[in-house]
């Protein structure tokens, strides 16, 4: 499977410009982590990829053909977990997955048993959904997305509400699945991306700020990360973004990223989180997209 | 295949839905409400009481309930955000269609379940009058299609508006048109509350089911068309209505079927074959026919073949015309019939039928060659008889069914206005009907017949130029004599058990003997012959003519015979009803006032007859004392003692109390007043003399009813004289 996004611009009827002239290409196997602050345009991109929205400009193609002409094929190959979703509370976990399986035209009940096993929900298969906790509901959402071994998996904040152990388990499951598929994982948890993704996409203000491997993202941050000491009440040095603060006997030790580290800072080895912050705060990425009037 | 797969999962999900379960329970429980909320259906026949009223109540209540479920289910996807999962993997239009079809299937299952739940009770109550086929047909004809129409409308409105409150408002408006007075007696406009006058137990007719099915199909067509259009309104790509329609039109080929279904519904409405297309009211004709004495018919032969399977008539009318009319001539026929051929002296003659229905008739114009005398005019015609629009809301007058036939006037033969026959019985009619039906032609029992050996029998009778009335049904005819008077007592075979159990034949003898002795011979008795015929409840009332007196079917209904206002036993209630032959529309036509009506005289007469039959003690206990007790109770009532408080009650309660007061006034207070009058005028004999005089002079009151003041004038008393206080 191959997806090509070519010069996509998305402006909502309200006038909000969500994406601006973005292009990307992905081919199986590929595990792409999508990073970006809230409102950056990640969810819009995902909705465009599942044909839930029509782009204002540009074209998306699936295996070389326009996506809209391939909608039926797309739906048959898609596993999608949106950021916010609902479930039929009156159904049991099994019944709901059976329902989703039927929607996906999956007739083999083994597929349901398999995803239940994978998502650690087998013991809860007869439990009504209304009795599940938030995390358990999230697992049902993941299970339905994995049903039928889809070739394109799009996950929007899938590990929200999961405990750390489950989060690790799920990201490993996603990683396994990505061996022969395209998986798009939108998350705020940089660690997850670092752990499993072979490609990172940083989106900010509707633009793709970075598209490459995690190592490349880190590499471009070398010499832009450092630590410095300060006293409580001191402001951050000009042009610096504080990544973390640690209170010590000498005061506060801050980890900072900056285009030019201040003299007081001591350069250190960057992490992906540092790299992400550096990417979205570097001066050339600070130009905001202006809001345009509503389309008539 | 995809749609079926989606439908299957949606249906399975609905089976587990609590909302759907509640809807099913409410729908089932709504049926008995009909008999609690009176005036939902008109009749008191067993079929009306135990089948029609519950089914119509369940139909309307269920339609609203299922519409609510549909709206909730449609909105639920959006409200609970399940659609973000489902829309990603299945086409939203297919999913919506599957959901609606699944709900329709569930409602069909609930219809069957409802019918099964009430089956034992209904069968037990109706006993030998119960017909399983007729019972289930009512559910399938009225309830199920109406629920489906309601579901389709609700879903369509939601898909178009995508807002629950707006959908509800539009649905209420749509239902309101059907339920409100605008469509009060309109068979076609009432989509959510089908209009059925009543049912008959003894003379069942499927006419209401026929028109019911037709109107349901009509509305299903319209609803399906609108629903298909609404599929195009399903929002795509988070865009608005217009954009979504334009996108969906390219992918979903439903626009043409949608237009076709709506058009089919409208055409079915416009070309419906049940009610004529004339004015709602009776139109008095301005035509003054100047018939030339020379235009004479010497003989007429009618050959009528009635086919109950299709409800149609195929007929031939032959007129031996001595001298034809000059210029263009006209005949009138039922608008449902089509003249297939018209010949004169063996030659086809041109004719034109004009679509201007008036009073249940449609004119056809033709011209005979006036130089050709003493030739035969042959008119062949056939079709399904329509009901006259101006009476169709009160009775079913023209119908051809397997179990009951009723035709009148132009629904039997053409009316040629411009000819004399010269003799009373110029026509011979051959009428072919199923061999198990007993026919009455022009209110007389037909006696001369030939068995055709194919399940039909051809009856022959001489009759006047026009046949005014043809009735056939499952009748039992008991013939007996009262002195010189030969009585044919014709009643529905279904009532044989009731007639035998209550010794109705002997009761009739008692009534006719008593009534004739005390008030005078029934004017309908003719040449020492009287036909007393039970009329179908569908007909809307009884009538009296020379030689025949009909009475309403429900006189023998168990509900009527157990009405203690009218008598202490079923036999006495029957006495009461038959005494209406003297006191009521068929005899002395009494006005219906707060206190005065035909009931006062009839209850008093019943008391007198019972007193003569069972003795003074019995009559005192079950009539006079019972009247006094009821009147005393009425007098003691708080609201009657303090009417100022009655006015403060809600209108519904006021109406109930006033209605109960009127019943006591007419059935108990007035008989007591007449009893007082009897004493004041000089006793029973004197009273009988006055009543005899009143009945003899009844013709004076045919135009203007007989009022209480008229009665007081006959008595020579004032209202104060009869005051009971």
Image (cartoon, rainbow, N blue to C red):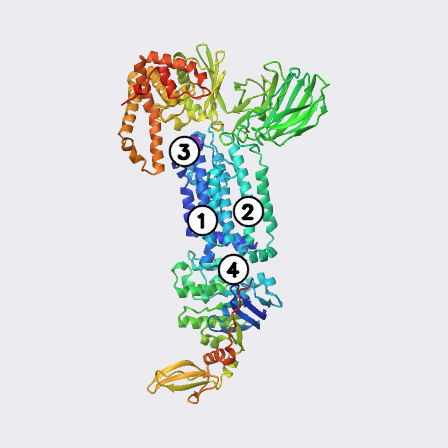
Residue B53's place in the image compared with B292, above or below, is below
Q: Which residue is mark 1?
A: B68
Magenta residue span: B39-43
Q: Taking A120 as reference, is B293 left or right?
A: right
For marks 2 and 4, give the CA distance. 23 Å
Q: Chain of mark 4?
A: B
Say whether disc 1 or disc 2 marks the residue closer to the N-terminus: 1
How packed mark 4 is, by other alpha carbons closer than 10 Å (few <14, some 14-19, many 20 or more), is many
Q: Which residue is mark 2?
A: B224
Please state which of the two labelled residues, at mark 2 or mark 4, is closer to the viewer: 2
Q: Earlier in the sequence, mark 4 or mark 1?
A: 1
Q: Looking at the image, can residue B513 be seen?
A: no
State whether residue A120 appears in this view. Answer: yes
Label 3 secondary element: helix
Q: CA distance from mark 1 to mark 3?
A: 34 Å
Compare residues B378 and B695 and report the one nearer the observer: B695
Principal secondary structure, stretch drawn in magenta: loop
> Where in the figure is residue B458, as x and y percent of width and height?
59, 22
Tell us which disc is closer to us: 4 or 3.
4
The residue tagged 4 is B87
Residue that sits furthest to the bottom in the current view: A263
Task: Kindly identify which residue carries mark 3.
Answer: B124
């Amino acid at each position: 499977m191959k997806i090509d996004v070519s010069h996509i611009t998305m402006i909502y009827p309200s006038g909000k410009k969500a994406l601006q002239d973005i292009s990307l290409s992905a081919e199986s196997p590929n595990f792409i982590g999508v990073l970006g602050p809230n409102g950056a345009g990640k969810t819009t991109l995902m909705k465009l990829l599942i044909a839930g929205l029509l782009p204002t400009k540009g074209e998306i193609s699936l295996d070389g053909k326009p996506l809209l002409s391939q909608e039926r094929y797309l739906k048959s190959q898609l596993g999608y977990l949106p950021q916010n979703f609902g479930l039929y509370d009156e159904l049991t976990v099994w019944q709901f997955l059976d329902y989703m399986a039927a929607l996906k035209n999956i007739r083999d009940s083994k597929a349901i048993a398999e995803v239940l096993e994978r998502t650690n929900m087998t013991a809860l298969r007869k439990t009504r959904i209304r009795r599940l906790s938030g995390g358990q509901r999230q697992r049902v959402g993941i299970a339905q997305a994995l049903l039928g071994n889809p070739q394109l998996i799009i996950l929007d904040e899938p590990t929200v509400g999961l405990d750390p152990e489950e989060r690790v388990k799920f990201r490993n499951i996603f990683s396994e699945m990505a061996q022969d598929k395209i998986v798009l994982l939108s998350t705020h948890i940089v660690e997850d991306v670092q752990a499993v993704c072979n490609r990172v996409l940083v989106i900010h203000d509707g633009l793709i700020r970075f598209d490459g491997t995690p190592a490349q993202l880190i590499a471009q941050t070398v010499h832009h990360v450092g630590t410095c000491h300060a006293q409580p009440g001191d402001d951050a040095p000009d042009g610096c973004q504080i990544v973390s603060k640690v209170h010590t006997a000498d005061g506060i030790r801050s980890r900072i990223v900056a285009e030019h580290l201040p003299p007081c800072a001591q350069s250190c080895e960057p992490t992906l989180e540092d790299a992400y912050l550096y990417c979205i705060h570097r001066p050339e990425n600070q130009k905001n997209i202006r809001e345009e009037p509503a389309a008539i | 295949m995809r749609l079926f797969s989606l439908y299957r999962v949606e249906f399975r999900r609905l089976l587990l839905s609590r909302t759907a379960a509640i809807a099913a329970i409410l729908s089932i429980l709504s049926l008995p409400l009909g008999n609690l909320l009176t005036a939902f259906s008109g009749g008191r026949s067993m079929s009306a009481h135990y089948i029609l009223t519950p089914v119509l109540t369940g139909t309307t209540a269920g339609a609203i309930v299922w519409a609510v479920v549909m709206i909730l289910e449609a909105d639920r996807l959006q409200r609970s955000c399940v659609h973000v999962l489902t829309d990603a993997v299945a086409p939203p239009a297919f999913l919506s269609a599957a959901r609606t079809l699944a709900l329709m299937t569930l409602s069909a299952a609930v219809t069957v379940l409802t019918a099964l739940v009430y089956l034992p009770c209904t069968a037990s109550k109706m006993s030998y009058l119960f017909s399983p086929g007729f019972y289930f047909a009512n559910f399938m004809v009225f309830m199920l299609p109406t629920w489906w129409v309601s579901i389709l409308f609700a879903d369509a409105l939601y898909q178009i508006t995508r807002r629950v409150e707006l959908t509800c408002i539009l649905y209420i408006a749509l239902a309101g048109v059907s339920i409100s007075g605008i469509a009060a007696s309109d068979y076609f406009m009432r989509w959510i509350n089908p209009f059925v006058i009543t049912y008959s137990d003894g003379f069942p007719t499927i006419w209401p089911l026929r028109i019911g099915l037709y109107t349901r199909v009509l509305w299903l067509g319209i609803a399906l068309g609108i629903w298909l259009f609404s599929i195009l309104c399903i929002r795509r790509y988070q865009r608005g209505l217009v954009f979504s329609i334009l996108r969906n039109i390219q992918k979903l080929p439903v626009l043409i079927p949608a237009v076709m279904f709506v058009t089919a519904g409208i055409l079915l409405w416009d070309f419906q074959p049940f009610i004529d297309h004339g004015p709602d009211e009776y139109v008095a004709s301005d035509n003054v026919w100047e018939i030339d004495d020379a235009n004479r018919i010497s003989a007429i032969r009618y050959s009528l073949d009635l086919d109950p399977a299709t409800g149609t008539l195929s007929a031939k009318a032959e007129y031996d015309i001595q001298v034809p009319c000059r210029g263009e001539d006209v005949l009138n026929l039922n608008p449902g019939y089509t003249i297939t051929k018209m010949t004169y002296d063996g030659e086809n003659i041109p004719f034109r039928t004009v679509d201007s229905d008036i009073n249940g008739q449609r004119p056809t114009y033709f011209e005979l060659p006036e130089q050709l005398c003493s030739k035969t005019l042959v008119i062949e015609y056939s079709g399904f008889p329509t009901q006259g629009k101006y009476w169709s809301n009160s009775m079913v007058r023209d119908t051809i069914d397997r179990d009951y036939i009723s035709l009148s006037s132009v629904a039997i033969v053409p009316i040629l206005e411009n000819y004399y026959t010269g003799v009373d019985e110029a026509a011979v009619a051959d009428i072919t009907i199923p061999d198990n039906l007993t026919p009455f032609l022009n209110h007389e029992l037909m006696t001369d017949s030939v068995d055709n050996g194919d399940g039909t029998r051809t009856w022959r009778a001489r009759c006047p130029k026009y046949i005014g009335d043809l009735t056939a049904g499952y009748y039992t005819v008991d013939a007996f004599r009262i002195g010189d008077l030969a009585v044919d007592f014709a009643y529905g075979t279904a009532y044989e058990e009731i007639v035998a159990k209550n010794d109705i034949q002997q009761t009739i003898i008692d009534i006719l003997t008593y009534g004739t002795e005390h008030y005078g011979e029934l004017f309908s008795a003719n040449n020492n012959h009287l036909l007393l015929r039970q009329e179908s409840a569908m007909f809307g009332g009884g009538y009296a003519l020379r030689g025949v007196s009909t009475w309403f079917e429900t006189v023998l209904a168990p509900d009527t015979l157990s009405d203690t206002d009218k008598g202490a036993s079923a036999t006495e209630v029957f006495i009461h009803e038959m005494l209406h032959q003297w006191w009521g529309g068929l005899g002395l036509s009494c006005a219906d006032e707060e206190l005065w009506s035909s009931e006062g005289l009839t209850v008093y007469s019943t008391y007198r007859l019972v007193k003569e039959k069972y003795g003074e003690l019995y009559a005192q206990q079950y009539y006079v004392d019972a009247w006094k007790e009821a009147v005393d109770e009425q007098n003691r009532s708080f609201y009657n003692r303090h009417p100022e408080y009655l006015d403060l009650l809600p209108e519904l309660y006021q109406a109930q109390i006033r209605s109960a007061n009127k019943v006591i006034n007419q059935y108990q207070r007035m008989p007591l007043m007449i009893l007082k009058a009897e004493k004041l005028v000089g006793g029973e004999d004197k009273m009988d003399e006055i009543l005899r005089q009143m009945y003899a002079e009844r013709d004076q009151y045919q135009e203007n009813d007989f009022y209480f003041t008229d009665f007081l004038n006959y008595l020579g008393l004032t209202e104060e004289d009869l005051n009971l206080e």
